[in-house]
Amino acid sequence: MDKYIYDESNGLWYELQGDYYIPCLILPTEKEYKPIGLWGQRHKRYLQEHKRAVYITFLTSGKLNCYLTDIDEQATEMIFRLVEQMADKESVTEQLKVEKPMLWVGRMNEIQTRAREIVYVDIIYKQKCNI
């Protein structure tokens, strides 16, 4: 038996694995590879664990990296915007930072924690996946 055979009816190569011929399939490569940041990695983990079909669809279509970098950019922009807005609303200013640095640190940590929770809820866990 040949190690590889070509089927002209569907244009696929097959490789002999034990007693069976398995199609030689390759995932499509993405045009541009960008590193995926923290929020993209967290969304990827969520897809792998809870939305397996969506994850596989993105992976096999070659759009996973682009999608995850977009999610990462959205989440990063949102967290910066939220922290800035909350700090302004709650009067956590540079003046407070100079006068009472420990109070400023504590309040900024609270604001950042709330902003991260909002990003988790709005982007990481509830993102609509347009495949």
Image: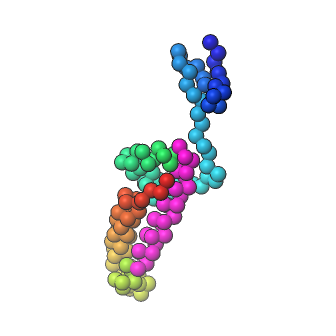
Nearest to the observer: residue 97 or residue 50: 50
Query: In the image, is residue 71 part of the stretch drawn in magenta?
Result: yes
Magenta stretch, overall SS: helix
Image-based side of 7 in relation to 114, left or right: right
Q: What span is in magenta?
A: 60-85
Q: In x, y percent, where is residue 15?
A: 60, 23
Q: In x, y percent, where is residue 90?
A: 34, 83
Nearest to the observer: residue 86 or residue 2: 2
Image-based side of 75 in relation to 103, left or right: right
Whether residue 98 is visible: no
Q: How many marks?
A: 0
- Scheme of colours in the image: rainbow
In the picture, the quarter occupied by the N terminus is: top right
Residue 11 picture quarter: top right
Tell me what residue is drawn at x 45 percent, y 59 percent: 39
Q: Is residue 27 above or below residue 40?
A: above
Q: In x, y percent, where is residue 69?
A: 53, 58
Tell me what residue is drawn at x 48 percent, y 60 percent: 71
Nearest to the observer: residue 64 or residue 99: 64
